[in-house]
Image (cartoon, grey):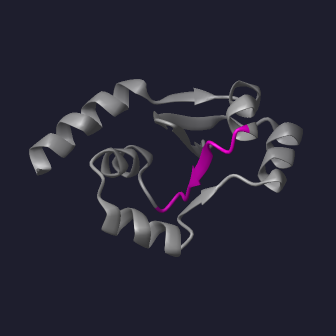
C-alpha cells in the first residue's frame, strides 16, 4: 500500500501547479474547490484521497484541515489574486495558498 501511495504522490507532484483565482473561478461556482490547510502536505492529502483513506480524510474534515472554499475565500482571492498551489482529485480541486 505504501509503495502504491508513493507512486501516486510522484504522479501528482508532476500534476500540481501554481494557478490564479481566475483559473479556478468556474470550479468554485460548481462547489468543487477545497482548501487544504498549510499543516497538511497538498500532494500527500490528494494521494490519500485518491487511495480512499476515509479515516484520514474524515479526521481532516472534522478538524477543518480540509474545507470547501467559501464566498469569503472567493472574495479574498478576487481582491488579492494570490498564487494557489492546485491539484485535481476529480471532481475536486484541492488548493493551498502559495507561500511567499
Query: What residue is drawn where x is 29% and y is 28%?
Result: 11
User: Can you give x and y, in whole percent of width and height, for residue 28 in the image?
Assistant: 71, 40
Image location of residue 12, percent across then percent down: 35, 32
Quadrant where the C terminus lies? top right
Q: Residue at x 28, y 38 (%)?
A: 9
Where residue 82 sits: x, y (%)?
A: 73, 38
Q: Is residue 99 visible?
A: no
Specify whether 73 is left or right of 92: right
100 relative position to 90: left or right? right
Residue 89, percent from left and from top? 44, 38
Q: What residue span does the magenta drawing correspond to?
A: 30-39
In the figure, residue 72 lies in which quadrant? Answer: bottom right
- Residue visible at 70% across and 29% down? 20
Quadrant position of residue 5: top left
Q: Is residue 99 above or below residue 53?
A: above
Taking the image as shown, residue 82 lies to the left or right of residue 92, namely right
Amino acid at each position: 500500500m505504501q509503495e502504491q501511495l508513493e507512486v501516486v504522490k510522484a504522479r501528482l507532484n508532476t500534476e500540481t501547479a501554481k494557478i490564479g483565482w481566475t483559473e479556478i473561478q468556474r470550479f468554485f461556482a460548481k462547489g468543487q474547490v477545497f482548501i487544504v490547510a498549510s499543516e497538511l502536505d497538498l500532494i500527500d492529502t490528494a494521494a490519500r484521497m485518491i487511495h480512499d483513506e476515509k479515516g484520514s480524510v474524515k479526521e481532516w474534515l472534522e478538524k477543518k484541515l480540509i474545507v470547501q472554499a467559501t464566498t469569503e475565500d472567493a472574495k479574498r482571492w478576487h481582491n488579492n489574486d494570490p498564487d494557489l498551489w492546485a491539484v485535481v482529485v476529480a471532481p475536486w480541486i484541492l488548493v493551498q495558498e502559495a507561500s511567499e
